[in-house]
Amino acid sequence: MSALQGQVGGDHYKGTAIQPVEFWQANRWDGCSCSSMKYLARWRRKAGLEDLKKAIHFVELRQELGDYLPYTAPPQAISMARFISANGITDTLDIAALTWLECYVQAAPNFRADYARTTVMAIEDIISGRAW
């Protein structure tokens, strides 16, 4: 059995066409971005509001921890659009938050703070109930 077919502590990833870990590995994302994306991708199937607050926290941690190497997508990268489509994510606010997170990860250093704020605002839109 493939490790992707098993899951410890639930099944909120097993049923997805592209699991968050597959996306991270293909795109070589940093730990904070991976965590934020994981919580955004699963919030409706697992911990709801708590997962959304965790997603914000990891965006803030990434921003606070400072500069990182410039992002260059590897040739085998999975696009966020493909991840969203393959996993049947249809809510426009969820799509916006995931897309802004991808922009934040890929942003040049002088734009990172703006993308971090926009990503947090997109998640806060979900929290405020506009997507519930």
Image (cartoon, grey):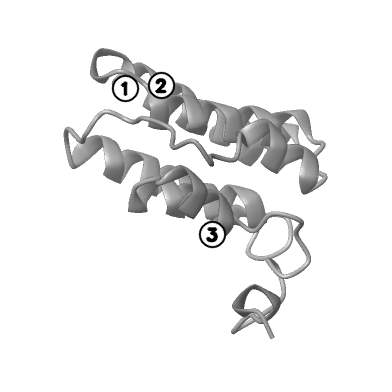
Indicate the position of residue 63 as horizontal and vertical percent values: 27, 35
| 5 vs 38, nearest the viewer | 5
Specify few, some or many for label 2: CA neighbours under 10 Å numbering under 14, 14-19, or 20 or more: many
Q: Residue at label 3?
A: 21
| 87 vs 28, nearest the viewer | 28
Q: Secondary structure at mark 2?
A: helix
Residue 103 visible in the picture: yes
Question: What amino acid does circle 3 point to?
Answer: Val
Q: Residue at label 1?
A: 112
Q: CA distance from mark 2 to mark 1?
A: 5 Å
Q: Residue at label 2?
A: 115
Q: Is residue 92 left or right of residue 36?
A: right
Question: What amino acid does circle 1 point to?
Answer: Arg
Residue at the location (59% across, 40% down)?
Answer: 78
Residue 91 sits above or below residue 1 on the image: above
Indicate the position of residue 52 as horizontal and vertical percent values: 55, 49
Quarter-of-image position of residue 116: top left
Indicate the position of residue 41 as horizontal and vertical percent values: 64, 50
Residue at the location (47% across, 54% down)?
Answer: 25
Residue at the location (65% across, 79% down)?
Answer: 2
Residue 59 sits above or below residue 109 on the image: below
Q: Mark on residue 84?
A: none
Q: Quadrant of the N terminus?
A: bottom right
Residue 53 sits above or below residue 80 on the image: below
First of labels 1, 3 by sequence position: 3
